[in-house]
Amino acid sequence: MNNDFPRIITLLRKERGLSQKKAAEELDVSQALLSHYEKGIRECGLDFVVRAADFYGVSCDYLLGRTPDRNGATISVDDIPEPDAMGKENVLKGSLLPVLNKKLIANSLNIIYGILQQCGNKHLTTEVSSYLNLSVYKTFRLLYSANAKNPQGMFSIPLKLSSGRCNAAQEISLSNAECLALGEDVEGMQGVAKGDIPELSPEKLSAEYPLFSSSLFNLIQNAELQMGAKKESKTATKR
C-alpha cells in the first residue's frame, strides 16, 4: 500500500461522522483491523480497497492517492477550460470588486507567462508557476477552512501545518526563480541564458500587450499602495 491510503480512509470516515467501530461494522472488518489500516500498521487486500471505495463513494485510485479527484478522473491540458469559458460558475454576481480584481490578475498573468515564454526556460517557468500555485492554494484553503463544517479530506497536509509549509515552499520557489532569472544554476536547474530575458519598459509592454498592459499597470499601482507607497494627488500629477 502507500502512505496516502491510511490518511484518506481516516478522513473519509471522519467526514461521514462515523466512529471507528461503526465504520468497521459497515466494512465487515474488526475495529482492531480497521485501526491498523488507518494507522498504516497493516496493509489491506484489494478486496478491502474495493469495499471501502464502494462504501465511501470514491474511486480506488482516489483511495490510493493516485488522483485528487474522488471519481478517479485525470485531467490533460486539453481538458482544462479557458479562464473565461462560459458557464454558470464563471458568473460573478453582486459587487463589481471581485470581477475587477479577477480581470486585473488574469490579464497580468497573461503578460507574466508571455515573458516566461520568451525566456524559453522551463525551470524558471516551473518555479514561477509553483509560487503562483501556492498563492492560490493558500487563499483557497483559507476560505474553505473558515467554515469548520467543511471536510478536509481533499487536503494531504493538516490545516495547522498548511500555512507555514505553504509559506516555506513559496520562499523556496521564489528564491529559485530569482537565481534562475539572473542566469545562475540552482539545484540542478539551469539558469536563463544571457540575452533571453527580454528588454521591457512600459512602452514596450503597452505595444506588445495592448489588451492586458493597463491591467498590469493598475495591479502594480494597487500592490504598491498596499505596500505603503504614497498615492500621488491629481494636482501633483498635472504639474
Image (tube, rainbow, N blue to C red):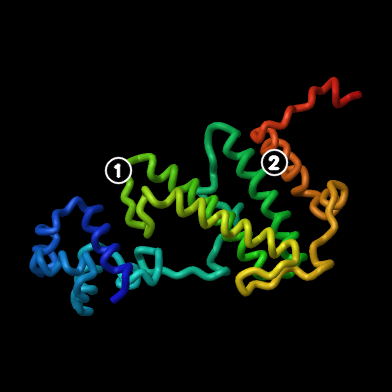
For the residue marked with disc 2, what is the amino acid?
Answer: Leu
* Residue farthest right in this picture: 239
- SS for dot 1: loop
Q: How many marks?
A: 2
Q: Is residue 85 above or below residue 123?
A: above
Q: In this image, 33 relative to 237: left or right?
A: left
Q: Is residue 44 at least partly visible in the picture?
A: yes
**Label 1: few (<14), some or many (≥20) within 10 Å?**
few
For the residue marked with disc 1, what is the amino acid?
Answer: Lys
Q: Is residue 54 at least partly visible in the picture?
A: no
Viewer-nearest residue: 161 or 15:
161
Mark 2 or mark 1: whose residue is earlier in sequence: 1
The residue pinned by badge 1 equals 149
Q: In this view, does 20 lie above or below 106?
A: below
Q: In this image, 137 relative to 190: left or right?
A: left
Q: In this image, 178 relative to 67: left or right?
A: right
| Residue visible at 56% across and 32% down in the picture | 95
Give the image location of residue 21, x and y in percent: 10, 59
Viewer-nearest residue: 14 or 40:
40
**Label 2: few (<14), some or many (≥20) within 10 Å?**
some
* Residue farthest top in this picture: 235
Give the image location of residue 92, x and y in percent: 54, 40
| Residue visible at 74% across and 68% down in the picture | 192
The residue pinned by badge 2 equals 219
Q: If the image is split into quadrants, where does the N terminus sit?
A: bottom left
